[in-house]
Amino acid sequence: MKEAEVLKYEAFTSSPGKGNPAGVVLQGDDYTEDEMQIIAERAGYSETSFIRKSESADLELRYFTPGHEMNLCGHATVASLYALCEKGMLESGKTYSIQTKAGILPVKISEKDGRIHITLEQASPQFKPFTGDRKKLADALGITEEDFHEDLPIVFGSTGIWTAIVPLKSLEASKKMVPDNKQFPEVLIDLPKASVHPFTFETVHPDSDLHGRHFSSPYSGTIEDPVTGTASGVMGAYMKQYGNAKQHKFIIEQGQEIGKDGKVEIEMNEAGGHVKVNMTGTAVYSETRILKI
């Protein structure tokens, strides 16, 4: 019987018990794909990342939910790079290339307010229309159609992972949502395996620009992801594309409804007609678990 050391880090917060917990396995090369899936399932975090050697980048990250592998995960990337920097395996002030199934992406490590911060350049934003039934989507979220924002569209967006972006009228609508994830595939007819990411302009914290929640696909083995980096990134790109936002930086809060208060910084830059989305966050170590597989 093999063992796996899984480090728990909470991303997008400096306070233990808040933010979004991720499992980090430093010795990812020791495990097969099937074993990585078993470890992620037994760890039980929304994502567990496995750090592996790469021939085409500085390192490779593989990401697994309890149910399946993901192409990219923002909070697990922050947790992994934070862990490597904290253990002296990477240096602050440098940019590293990471191989993911969403491509080879640059990650910058810097210090801000005395803490390590990780900045990930996400994949180029993509959008697809939502052609499903709005009432069924509202029902699946535990709200009504009247809670949807009147002027902004519901669309699928991706900066590495597809999610349905659902603009809401109010913070109250966000607070009252109780999703039935099992309904998502039949509602999200365009992309049945996508997650759902509602957001609102009303926020809990006065320094936040947007407030989000993130409900997982039923195939992933989790219900709500506390603070999501990739979905926050595509929210920023959505605001440029559909919200006519003039600003290029957003502070996005998430997790307050479930006691996991966290914040993600999103910055967008246009170069050569393409939008680059950068996501920044910090993390904090929580605990180490030894799992038998």
Image (tube, rainbow, N blue to C red):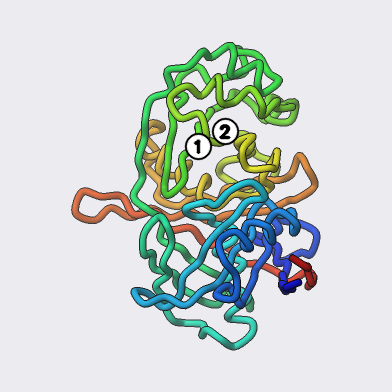
Mark 2 lies on a secondary structure that is strand
Seen in the picture, residue 71 relative to 172 is either above or below; the reply is below
Hey, which quadrant is residue 157 in on the image? top left
Asked whether, in this view, residue 275 is left or right of residue 287, the answer is: left
Q: Earlier in the sequence, mark 1 or mark 2?
A: 1
Hey, which quadrant is residue 143 in on the image? top right
Q: How many angstroms separate mark 1 from mark 2 (CA)? A: 5 Å
Give the percent coordinates (x, y) of residue 13: 69, 61
Instruction: Please say if the residues under marks 1 and 2 sit with CB atoms less than 8 Å apart.
Output: yes
Question: Label 2, on which residue?
Answer: 196
Q: Residue at x 60, y 59 (%)?
A: 34
Which mark identifies residue 163?
A: 1
Q: Residue at x 52, y 45 (%)?
A: 231
Crowding around mark 1 (Cα neighbors within 10 Å: few <14, some 14 to 19, many 20+) is: many
Amino acid of disc 1: Thr
Name the residue at the bottom extreme: 88
Asked whether, in this view, residue 147 is left or right of residue 58, the answer is: right
Give the percent coordinates (x, y) of residue 183: 63, 22
Near-viewer residue (44 or 22): 44
Q: How many marks?
A: 2
Crowding around mark 2 (Cα neighbors within 10 Å: few <14, some 14 to 19, many 20+) is: many
Amino acid of disc 2: Val
The quarter of the image holding the C terminus is bottom right
Q: Residue at x 25, y 50 (%)?
A: 274
